[in-house]
Image (cartoon, grey):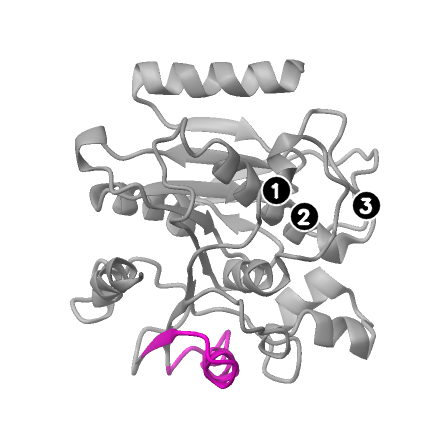
Amino acid sequence: MKYKILLVALIFMSQLNGQDTILPLWPKNEIPNRISSNESEVNKRGDILVISNVQVPTIEVFLPAKQNATGEAMLIFPGGGYGILAYDWEGTDIAKFLNGKGIAGIVVKYRLPSEVSQTNKHNVPLIDAQRALRMVRYHSKDFNITSEKIGIIGFSAGGHLASTLGTHFEDLVYDPLDAADKESARPDFMVLGYPVISMGPLTHEGSKRNLLGNTPTQELQDHFSNEKQVKVNTPPTFLFHATDDTAVPVENSLLFYNALKNKGVSVTMHIYPKGGHGFSLALNDQYLKGWTGLMYDWIESLD
């Protein structure tokens, strides 16, 4: 009850002050798969804000001006190889861009896999992702969001998490806690930027190791190879990637595109000749930054 009152108060205050809101995903002592440890969250500010050792997962809600709001929202999953979160570069910067288009941007500060502070660490990011989407859907009226227009966007390893949510939204990975957990965890649409998709030979080894450990079973690798998990109810998807990406091969996006196409899922893909990895909004590249406009037009084209 105290948790529910806290959430309502935080939402009310944010609306009153016109500020972004940070909401905890879970009551303090009811975070799934958490075990006691001496780990504490680390925030490092250099060219970008890097967060590691997340202990208390949150959503940071950025709402557009009411007169411009479309009713659409996107949950944002920053990348970082499941070892860190590039929190502003692939998180809050994206949210602020979306606000300019009238779309609510909601940055998910999800827990990163850790054998020190978690049990079954490979499920922990998905647990937080499912909970985040359910919470946003549950509070959609409070945020002036249409509950059937909630999408997700993820970058790099955050793209893997987003594609995991899009293919595993029905998986029972935690025990329901409250009324929010009665909501669907299915995104209405997905945007994946230079995503890790596969845990096979084309994977990003650091992301795979951080998520699955050093010697994962073939079954576990297949379970988190999302090109193998596409179903007919996987959400419509927009992919973008650069051919010269040496960190996450562009074949990851190609695999997912073909898997979606083969299941009859609506999919759009934009492959750029140059851009490397981790270009985010690509504001300094006149051609590459065009992905944002293409994405917006695609979202507006959805039924």
Whichever of callouts 3 and 1 sits on the residue coming sooner in the sequence is: 3
Disc assigned to residue 127: 2
Q: Using residue 232 as the reference point, say whether residue 126 is left or right of it.
A: right
Q: Which residues are magenta?
A: 243-270
Using the rendered view, name the quadrant where residue 279 is placed: bottom left
In this view of the protein, can residue 263 be seen by the observer? yes
Q: Secondary structure at mark 3?
A: loop
Residue highlighted by disc 1: 131
**Residue in view at x 76 percent, y 25 percent:** 29
Q: Which residue is more in the foreground, 68 or 284?
A: 68
**Residue in view at x 63 percent, y 45 percent:** 128
**Residue in view at x 23 percent, y 30 percent:** 66
Q: Please rate how many residues cluster around mark 3, counting C-alpha atoms within 10 Å: few if below 14, some from 14 to 19, many from 20.
A: few
Residue highlighted by disc 3: 116
Q: Which residue is more in the foreground, 146 or 200?
A: 146
Q: Secondary structure at mark 2?
A: helix
Whichever of callouts 3 and 2 sits on the residue coming sooner in the sequence is: 3
Whole-angstrom CA distance, mark 3 to mark 2, is 17 Å
Whole-angstrom CA distance, mark 2 to mark 1, is 6 Å
Q: How many marks?
A: 3
**Residue in view at x 67 percent, y 36 percent:** 55
Q: Percent from the top left, x then y, of residue 173?
A: 74, 51
Which residue type carries mark 2?
Ile
Using the rendered view, name the quadrant where residue 110 is placed: top right
Which residue type carries mark 3?
Val
Whole-angstrom CA distance, mark 3 to mark 1, is 22 Å
Evaluate if marks 2 and 1 touch, with contact meaning CB atoms under 8 Å apart: yes
Q: Secondary structure at mark 1?
A: helix
